[in-house]
Each structure stands twice: as structure tokens, then as C-alpha cells.
Amino acid sequence: MKKKTQLIHGGIPNDPHTGAVSVPIYQVSTYKQESVGNFKGYEYSRSGNPTRHALEELIKDLEGGKAGFAFGSGMAAITAVMMLFDSGDHVVLTDDVYGGTYRVMTKVLNRLGIESTFVDSSSMENIKKAIKPNTKALYIETPTNPLLKITDIKKAAALAKSHNLLTIVDNTFSTPYWQNPINQGADIVLHSATKYLGGHSDVVAGLVVVNSEKLAEELFFVQNSTGGVLGPQDSWLLIRGIKTLGLRMEEHEKNTRKIVEFLSTHPKVNKIYYPGLESHPNHEIAKQQASGFGGMVSFDVGSEENADRLLEGTKYFTLAESLGAVESLISVPARMTHASIPSDRRLELGITDGLVRISVGLEDAEDLIEDLNTALSK
Ligand SMILES: *Cc1c(COP(=O)(O)O)cnc(C)c1O
């Protein structure tokens, strides 16, 4: 089955009970048992709900794994995955991971004894150096947010495997439409489904796919024990969003190429971060491991004042956190998504005050370019 077909026919495409072509929203918490322990697959909606189950089967198929899990947010998904580890375990992570990931590792999970080290994972040497006797996993984000750095998934997963570590990939930016980390050796793939998978700025959700029965059993135990599950209404919204993921990603990509071309020639734009640019240091790896480069671009306009002028001047690029929706969004990572990272560490990473991030939406590219051009000229 090709990708666009799988988005529509993967998982459980029709309701097995009624034949409804759209899986219904099973707004229910508990299920009748014929006799004690004798029920039709569902006993209580924290443990399982038919709408959520349809979504979990769909993301499992899309990522090519053994089981899927839906959570109330991307952070709930990430936290549940980290609950696979014990006090005293150590995780190596990409240095410019999502700000919330950095925060939960360094302010919450550290209190439970889960240690973390952050390295530039585009270098295998850096990863190797960070591995300790108690390291249990390598957690990578590729491309990263907001600097669009690329890690070679195959090489990183092979390195992790040779040290008996699990490889976990946050695939939010690429989506399963462009990139399938499990096919490249990853053990666990996760998503903030709030972004491209939902795609319409109307749902907060997280998804995880694991590649073995053992991990499936362990993660189900965590999901059911800690309870951060996604509700049926939001599960339905995600299934609906995913049906058009292919069309949306193709259009995001087309618009982004045009915008990057425009930005490349603009005198007020200093540096552009986009893996689709041949000048990107890991352009070749990005091209090999993903079939598209996505709709996220960051660029430096030199100062906080210049960034503010740009943000205030755009009409179609809405100033907002988040990304991956039909609407184009613009943000300054230093003061928004990455504000929870201390300023000296931010500068170390290259997240300057003049760095602007855009999430290119599905408006007409000509309008978007004119919008940026007008705002940059102010
Ligand atoms: C948004 C985001 C998250 C967190 O997801 P929420 O749904 O906001 O909890 C994690 N990783 C990446 C890459 C993100 O962009």
C-alpha cells in the first residue's frame, strides 16, 4: 500500500460494528460485561476505547511498528516513554530538543533519578562520548527545532544498538509521511500529534509507536497505569486530520521551497536553516532518510528589534507557538518555545535573539512571500 492510500485505508478504516465509513466517536467510559471478565474487547476507556484504538492502529501502520499508543499531549507521550526507565538510568538526548523535552528531563524526571546528557547528535563521536555504563537510551529529534539540525538515524541507531541502548526518535517535524525511523533501526517513534498529524490547530495529542511486542507490553502497562490517554473526541479529530496528511505535506513542501528561495535573496536575512538547502551541512543525509524536507524554516534577522518588526508586520503569518497547521505561523524561539532553556545555553546552541522560525502553511505562496517581503521592508 502506498503512503497516501495507507493514510486513508490503514488502521481500522471502517467501524466493525456498524460499517460507518468514519470511525464513530465512542464517547464512553465503561462497557457492559456479559459475566465477570467476559467482555467484547473493551472494559474501561483508560485501558482501551474503540475510537482511540482505531487511531493507535493507524499510527502503528503508518510508522511500520508493532503497536501504537495515543496520549493527551506530546509531552504526555514523551513522559510515558521515559517511564520505561528506572531510577539510576541515563538517557543521551539531542541538544536542541523541543524545550518541553529539555524541561521534563532536567526539572521533573531528574527528581525521579533519571539522568540525562544533551549532545549535538549530528556527530556520532559526540553520542559515543556521552554513553555511560548506566545509559539505557538514545533520544533524537531530527530535524531539530528550531535549528533544523539533522541526525543520521541509521548510524545513530546502529551505534545505540551496539551499546544495547534503545533508540527513540521524535518524528514530529517530518511526520510518517516523509520519514519512518523504525525502518532505519529505531525502537520507538513518537510525535506531538498537535502539529502536522492533527494539522488544523484544533487538538493537542501525542502518539507513540514501538517496534517490539516486549516494548508494546511495557508501554501499555505505563499508559494504563499512569493514565495520560487521549479522549475519543480528540482521537477522532486526529484520524480525520491524518487522512489529508499526504496532500498537506506535499503543499507545505512546495510553499516552503518558494519561500526559502525568496529568503535566500533577501538582504535583511542573514542565515537560513532548512535541510532542503544544498548548503545545509547535512543536506545529503536528510535527502537519504526522508522523502521530504518539511515546512519548517528558521532564519536570522540580526537582532531582537528586527525580529519584533518582522513579527508585527506580517498579516498571514500569525504570531503563535506551535507549528504544522494549515495556517502559517511565525515565532521567536528565544522568547517563546525555547524560553524555558537558560539564555547562556540558548546562545551556545545558536538560538539567537534575532532567530525567527516560521511554519509555512497552506495559503497561496505568492501571498505568503508578499507578506514577508512587506514586513521585512519595514
Ligand atoms: C510540540 C512538540 C512537542 C510537545 O508536544 P505537545 O503536544 O505540545 O505536548 C514535542 N516535540 C516536538 C518536536 C514538538 O514540536
Image (cartoon, rainbow, N blue to C red):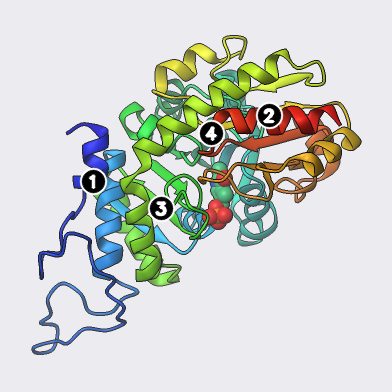
Foreground pick, 315 / 160: 315
Looking at the image, tell me whether mark 4 or mark 3 is earlier in sequence order.
3
Q: Distance between the residues labelled 2 and 4?
A: 10 Å
Q: Identify the residue position indicated by label 2 in the image.
A: 370
Are the two marked residues, 2 and 4, in contact with CB atoms closer than 8 angstroms? no
**Residue plotted at (33% across, 61% down):** 220
Q: Tell me the mark number nearer the camera, choosing from 1 and 2.
A: 2
The correct choice, above or below, for 210 with respect to 132 in the image is below
Q: Tell me the mark number nearer the camera, choosing from 4 and 3.
A: 4
The kind of secondary structure element at disc 4 is loop
For mark 2, does the 10 Å Cα neighbourhood hold few (<14), some (14 to 19), or many (20 or more) residues?
A: some
**Three-letter amino acid code at the position of disc 4:** Asp
Q: Identify the residue position indicated by label 3 in the image.
A: 207
Are the two marked residues, 1 and 4, in contact with CB atoms closer than 8 angstroms? no
Q: How far apart are marks 3 and 2 (CA)?
A: 36 Å
Residue extending farthest to the bottom is 35
Q: Identify the residue position indicated by label 4 in the image.
A: 364
Foreground pick, 351 / 252: 252
Where residue 41 appears, x then y in whole percent? 15, 72
Q: Identify the residue position indicated by label 1 in the image.
A: 8
**Residue plotted at (31% across, 40% down):** 63
Q: Distance between the residues labelled 4 and 3?
A: 30 Å
